[in-house]
């Protein structure tokens, strides 16, 4: 059988494949990844890949280098322009880098990083906080399930306690199934902090059993935050306001509260997709998770899939939007599949510095 394939058609097919891959990733990031886990989502993902990647590759082969192939060239150029815009915005919004990072160093020879958790420390000035340093330990996305190894999570808790935090924040996705909920007390009860432990739910908590997760987390000594009213934390003569945002899964619109202007307002938001609205409302800092830093990253490139309306823009780290600091955790666990590639889990330690340093009042 003589396979006399036209090189120009193969080149056009490759162009279509690239366009299809870019279109598929954009669709997954901004739309499909927000679907609830289940048969619909597991069916939609491969179908969308077949339609986008396979369909445009076939279109390219049939079109060859003709007027129709210009459509693919324009689409690919539009995607390239979008990538350049993303990289420019990412640089502009990036804030201060970590002051320290503890954990295994990056190595191309060690792609699986599922349990190689890092402790990443930031230090930043906080507007309206007139006081001594306030240390926040920020964790997210435990995704506890029947196969989770409790020894790993115990080590995470020990490391958090060793940092002597003033506040502990957990920004949702405690459990991935009912077995995970039963494991929560063993993980959470050992966490300690000077001024309190605070949490919100994530999408997987709402998909599993939000009432039961809230009950177990509260019994472990956490205050469950919501958008209905702020929680005021008292530190000697100083105060700060805390609120939570678990939209869109909570059904709330996360309309931010009327917090006195002299109090710093810290918001726990499971996803950073609300950052522009929260910044406009005057939040001093926002703590988020949900993205897992992509969970799978390409060395020297970064993640391909991040479940956000902004794509990969806020996938991980410290950003500054207006006057608002945004801290996005890579999370502690992993989900679907429970595997991390070149993407270690982390604990964020954030030292919030006031404009005046004076001793704490015991």
Image (cartoon, grey):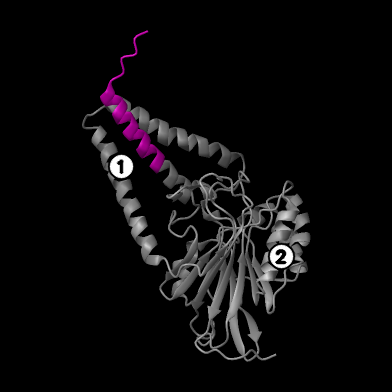
Q: Nearer the viewer, mark 1 or mark 2?
A: 2
| Residue under the point 44% across and 74% down | 280
| Residue under the point 78% across and 60% down | 186
Q: Please say whether residue 258 is visible from this viewpoint.
A: no
Circle 1 Cα neighbour tier, 10 Å, few/some/many (<14 / 14–19 / ≥20): some
Residue 251 on the magenta span = no
Circle 2 Cα neighbour tier, 10 Å, few/some/many (<14 / 14–19 / ≥20): few
Residue 20 on the magenta span = yes
Task: Give the SS element for disc 1.
Answer: helix
Q: Nearer the viewer, residue 303 or 204?
A: 303
Say whether residue 90 is left or right of residue 286.
left
Q: Is 41 drawn above or below residue 218 in the view shown?
A: above
Give the farthest residue toward the left. 67
Return the residue at label 2.
Answer: 158
| Residue under the point 52% across and 67% down | 327
Q: Nearer the viewer, residue 274 or 328?
A: 328
Residue 355 appears at what percent x and percent y?
49, 87
Return the residue at label 1.
Answer: 76
Most common SS among magenta residues: helix
Q: Please say whether residue 249 is visible from this viewpoint.
A: yes
Residue 199 appears at what percent x and percent y?
65, 68
Tell me the magenta residue range.
Answer: 1-22
Picture disc at residue 358: none
User: How many numbered marks are there?
Assistant: 2
């Amino acid at each position: 059988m003589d396979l006399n394939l036209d090189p120009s058609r193969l080149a056009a097919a490759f162009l279509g494949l690239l366009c299809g891959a870019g279109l598929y990733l954009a669709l997954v990031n901004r739309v499909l990844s927000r679907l609830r886990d289940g048969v619909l989502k597991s069916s939609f993902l491969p179908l969308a890949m077949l339609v986008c990647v396979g369909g445009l590759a076939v279109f390219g082969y049939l079109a060859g280098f003709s007027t129709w192939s210009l459509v693919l060239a324009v689409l690919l150029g539009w995607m390239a322009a979008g990538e350049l815009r993303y990289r420019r915005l990412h640089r502009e919004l990036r804030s201060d880098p970590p002051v320290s990072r503890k954990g295994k160093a990056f190595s191309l020879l060690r792609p699986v990083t599922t349990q190689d958790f890092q402790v990443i420390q930031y230090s930043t000035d906080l507007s309206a906080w007139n006081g001594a340093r306030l240390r926040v330990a920020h964790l997210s996305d435990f995704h506890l399930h029947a196969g989770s190894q409790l020894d790993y999570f115990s080590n995470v808790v020990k490391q958090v306690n060793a940092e002597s935090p003033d506040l502990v924040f957990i920004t949702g996705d405690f459990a991935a199934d009912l077995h995970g909920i039963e494991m929560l007390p063993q993980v959470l009860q050992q966490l300690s902090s000077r001024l309190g432990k605070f949490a919100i739910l994530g999408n997987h908590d709402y998909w599993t059993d939000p009432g039961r997760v809230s009950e177990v987390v509260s019994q472990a000594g956490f205050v469950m935050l919501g958008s209905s009213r702020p929680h005021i934390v008292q530190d000697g003569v100083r105060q700060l306001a805390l609120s939570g945002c678990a939209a869109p899964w909570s059904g709330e619109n996360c309309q931010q509260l009327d917090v006195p202007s002299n109090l710093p307002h810290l918001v726990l938001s499971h996803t950073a997709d609300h950052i522009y609205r929260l910044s406009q409302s005057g939040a001093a800092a926002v703590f988020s998770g949900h993205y897992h830093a992509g969970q799978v990253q390409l060395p020297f490139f970064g993640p391909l899939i991040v479940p956000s309306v902004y794509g990969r823009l806020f996938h991980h780290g410290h950003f500054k939007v207006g006057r608002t600091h945004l801290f996005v955790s890579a999370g502690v666990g992993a989900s679907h599949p429970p595997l991390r590639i070149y993407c270690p889990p982390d604990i964020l330690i954030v030292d919030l510095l006031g404009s005046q340093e004076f001793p704490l009042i015991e």
